[in-house]
Image (cartoon, rainbow, N blue to C red):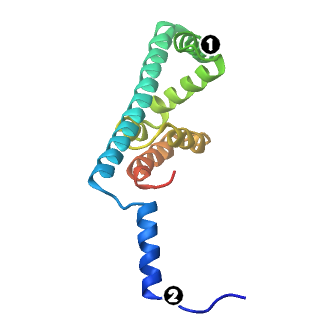
Amino acid sequence: MFDSRVPSAEAIAAMDEHFERRYPSVTPESAALLERVAGLARAENRAAAGQLAVIGELFAYRLSRCAECEEWAVDTEAAVAAEVAAELRISQGLAASRVRYARALRERLPRTGEVFAAGDIDFGIFRTLVYRTDLITDPDVLAAVDAQLAANVARCPGW
């Protein structure tokens, strides 16, 4: 059923040459282009983290303006989401999601947020980490988890 012969050295060399033509090795030009791609991805990550940081600042500002009604945080969150939705021309639901992640960046996972702001992880990874840590209510445990995530998340390939 299967051919058990070992291919000749010439056949292997021909296949290597064919593979190299079809899938060339890294060249200085391709390395420079890939470096630019990586740099732009990091810039995109920094920009996404920056946007969330500013949304978080807006939330804190709006909350401080109605500090006498701190239990109204949900209303403040909805109001900030409406402002963000209008400014970015996105849906109310998407804006509410951004406010939620902005608050997580600022209040729950600030050290992981620093890694995000440095461009070392993307928004998708940050979203996943926020989701996976949402059930942690103990501030000390959350701080310890945040520190562990910040120390290790950038080293995890393939997220």
Left or right of 84? Residue 34 is left
Give above or below for 111 relative to 59.
below
- Asked if residue 121 shows in the view, the reply is yes
Check disc 1 and report the residue beneath it: 75
Residue at position x 33%, y 40% in the image: 39
- The disc label shown at residue 7, or none: 2
Residue at position x 46%, y 40% in the image: 122
Left or right of 93? Residue 159 is left
Where does the image place residue 111, in percent across and percent down from the top left?
39, 40
Residue at position x 59%, y 20% in the image: 95
Give above or below for 84 relative to 122.
above
Left or right of 26? Residue 64 is right
Residues under labels 1 and 2: Cα distance? 72 Å
Q: Quick one: label 1 or label 2, which is nearer the N terminus?
A: 2
Identify which residue, 117 or 1, lies in the foreground: 1
- Asked if residue 71 shows in the view, the reply is no
Residue at position x 62%, y 15% in the image: 78
Q: Are marks 1 and 2 in contact (CB under 8 Å)?
A: no
Identify which residue, 132 or 124, lies in the foreground: 124
- Residue furthest toward the right? 1
Q: Quadrant of residue 46?
A: top left
Where does the image place residue 14, in percent across and percent down from the top left?
44, 76
Q: Which image quarter is the N terminus in?
A: bottom right
